Image (cartoon, rainbow, N blue to C red):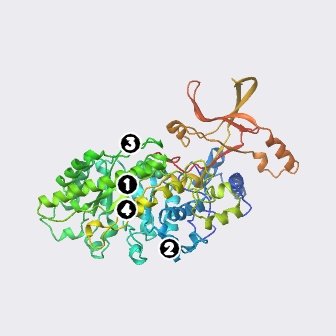
């Protein structure tokens, strides 16, 4: 399954009606990442040859259609491979880790065939809201929705822009993920029916206004009781956002209801303000993450009262303040941080509840306010820690078949990196207590609904990059006068898909793919190939930009066989924050 890195949309044709039209299936002979990439290079080259021959045969002047241009770009510069099975597996693994109640759900036997059907002590669900900004490729967003729908697993989207809201809303509606009340039907607790949160910390008023229009209802849609699905959840990081929301609502009313008093019959056709719910985002420690967000968002505990007050002063109803969210920073592998954040979340909820209960009292309403949403945000590592995490790209096909069903929840002790399984195990008792009603007869002790906004977790391992070497040189090895370092230049650099080199000092180690290895030349034997590859040289990989003072260093030092211009470098786990930036 391939997508050209020069475009957001995957190339090639479809071989199955159940797949989006731009997705191809790989033959079983393709066994790992490098053989997947070489297969795709052959497919692209054959396709281009075929098109050229057709042009010559029909004596047409060589034409350059969009598709040809995409294919040529892919051969010149590189392309990305998407393994949709990894996405599917990630959704299953998430629910296996964060929705333990599903273990005993007959519909989900395929999640774990070894399920012993013992009743689980835990019965909460953390619904994942995929952070679209992490990889806004339409194919990724759609595939997740399709899988969620097919497997009846709850899924939502965390959106950072109007374009993402549109994309997410389309998929939610296409796959009927919204408002199906599956929670009630299946007797599962705490599954929200609203599946989109607009969680950008700094939204322009115009964007908020667009969001309101996107989620607005008409009187006819309201009468079809669709109002639930059209709720818009907005996060709030401080008082400035309260003012912006108030302005956006004013703009909406001016635009859509300006003449209401004079022409009330006409107002029937007008857009109605959507049901807006507010989620207060609090600051939590993020020092253990690859990319901390603390400066970008999150209010401090002592700001909560003021923000709540400003909400009330600017037309937001107390009952529309539904809960809190936070973010531990992207790539957070520190289990204690998640526990600390949960504790801070619990305290923040109490603080909001207290302030709003006081507000009711001031208005002679003697009821208790209860927030009901806790959004654990994103930050989760790319590795889930269940068996076969590396997926199709780095495992052989037979192994892969096993992996999809064999996802036993054993936090892998041999793993050196913290995985999502480690985090899930640590937070289980806390999540259980947060979702357990203390007193069934007391509406003020209703259990919380849990969601999270994982981005990297879903896509990091699902996408790989193939980049073609276009220049080769060598420099002296400063540590060994007699040695030379091979220097390869590729068209992707630290200003683009490798920006994490600059943002968080990440290092990217490529796997080599030589074009000779792709050839069917009978004079080159398998032994020749092997011998060529077995001698490794100290090598450096550079991107296309940079000068003597600031090089575009993708990989400063790695061991590679002798490669030539036209050979390929393949980079695995390239799905998170490569096509986009947080
Ligand atoms: C508000 C919000 N939620 C979720 C995410 C996803 O984070 P991650 O990819 O680390 O899971 C981000 C990333 O920037 C974000 O800003």
Query: Quick one: SS at disc 3?
Result: loop
- The residue to which callout 4 is attached is 434
The numbered mark, 1 or 4, whose residue comes first in the sequence reads: 1
Contact (Cβ within 8 Å) of mark 1 with mark 4: no
**Residue that mark 2 sits on:** 119
**Residue found at x 66% / y 66%:** 402
Q: Secondary structure at mark 4?
A: helix
Q: Nearer the viewer, mark 2 or mark 1?
A: 2
Q: Is residue 424 visible?
A: yes
1 or 4: mark nearer the eye: 4
Left or right, 116 with reference to 539? left
Kindly tell me whether mark 1's CB lies below 8 Å from ligand 1.
no
Residue 121: x, y in percent? 47, 69
Question: In this rendering, does residue 143 appear at all?
Answer: no
Horizontal side, residue 521 vs residue 14: left or right: right
Where residue 114 appears, as percent x and y from the top left, is 61, 71
For residue 294, which numbered disc appears in the image?
Answer: 3
Q: Is mark 4 within 8 Å of ligand 1?
A: no
- At numbered mark 1, what does the secondary structure look like: helix, strand or loop? helix
How far apart are the two marked residues, 1 and 4, measured between alpha carbons?
A: 32 Å
Residue 270 coordinates in the image, percent (x, y): 24, 66
Q: Which numbered marker is on residue 162?
A: 1
């Amino acid at each position: 399954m391939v997508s050209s890195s020069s475009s957001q949309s995957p190339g090639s044709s479809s071989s199955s009606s159940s797949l989006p039209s731009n997705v191809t299936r790989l033959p079983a002979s393709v066994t790992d990442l490098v053989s997947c990439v070489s297969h795709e290079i052959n497919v692209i080259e054959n396709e281009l040859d075929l098109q050229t021959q057709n042009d010559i045969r029909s004596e047409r002047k060589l034409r350059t259609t969009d598709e040809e241009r995409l294919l040529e770009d892919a051969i010149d510069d590189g392309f990305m491979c998407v393994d949709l099975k990894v996405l599917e597996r990630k959704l299953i693994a998430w629910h296996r880790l964060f929705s333990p109640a599903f273990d005993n759900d007959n519909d989900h036997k395929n999640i774990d065939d070894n399920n012993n059907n013992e009743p689980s002590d835990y019965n909460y669900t953390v619904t994942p809201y995929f952070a679209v900004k992490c990889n806004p490729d339409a194919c990724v967003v759609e595939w997740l929705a399709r899988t969620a729908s097919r497997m009846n697993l709850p899924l939502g989207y965390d959106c950072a822009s109007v374009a993402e809201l549109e994309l997410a809303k389309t998929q939610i509606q296409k796959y009927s993920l919204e408002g199906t009340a599956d929670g009630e039907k299946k007797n599962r607790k705490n599954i929200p029916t609203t599946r989109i949160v607009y969680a950008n910390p700094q939204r322009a008023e115009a964007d908020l206004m667009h969001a309101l229009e996107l989620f607005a209802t008409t009187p006819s849609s309201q009468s079809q009781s669709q109002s639930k699905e059209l709720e818009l959840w907005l996060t709030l990081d401080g008082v400035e956002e309260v003012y912006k929301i108030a302005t956006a609502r004013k703009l909406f009313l001016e635009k859509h209801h300006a003449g209401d008093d004079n022409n009330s019959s006409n107002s029937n056709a007008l857009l109605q303000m959507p049901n807006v719910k507010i989620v207060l985002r609090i600051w939590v420690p993020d020092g253990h993450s690859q990319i901390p967000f603390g400066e970008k968002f999150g209010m401090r505990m002592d700001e909560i009262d003021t923000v709540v007050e400003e909400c009330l002063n600017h037309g937001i109803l107390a009952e529309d303040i539904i809960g809190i969210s936070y973010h531990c920073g992207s790539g957070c592998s520190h289990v204690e941080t998640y526990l600390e954040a949960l504790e801070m979340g619990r305290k923040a909820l109490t603080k909001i509840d207290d302030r709003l209960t006081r507000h009711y009292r001031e208005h002679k309403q003697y009821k208790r306010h209860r927030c009901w949403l806790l959004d654990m945000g994103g930050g989760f590592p790319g590795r889930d820690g269940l068996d076969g995490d590396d997926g199709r790209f780095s495992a052989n096909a037979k192994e892969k078949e096993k992996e999809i069903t064999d996802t036993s929840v054993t936090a892998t002790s041999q793993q050196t990196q913290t995985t999502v399984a480690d985090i899930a195990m640590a937070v289980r008792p806390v999540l259980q207590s947060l979702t357990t009603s203390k007193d069934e007869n007391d509406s003020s002790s209703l259990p919380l609904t849990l969601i999270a906004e994982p981005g990297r977790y879903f896509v990091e391992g699902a996408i790989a990059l193939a980049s073609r070497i276009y220049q080769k040189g060598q420099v002296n090895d400063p540590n060994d006068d007699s040695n030379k370092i091979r220097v390869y230049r590729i068209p992707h650099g630290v200003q683009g898909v490798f920006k994490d080199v600059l943002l968080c000092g990440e290092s990217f180690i490529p796997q080599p793919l030589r074009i000779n290895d792709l050839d069917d030349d009978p004079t080159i034997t398998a032994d020749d190939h092997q011998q060529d590859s077995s001698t490794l040289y100290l090598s450096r990989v550079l991107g296309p930009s940079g000068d003597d003072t600031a090089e575009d260093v993708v990989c400063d030092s790695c061991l590679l066989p002798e490669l030539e211009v036209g050979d390929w470098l393949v980079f695995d786990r390239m799905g998170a924050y490569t096509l986009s930036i947080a």
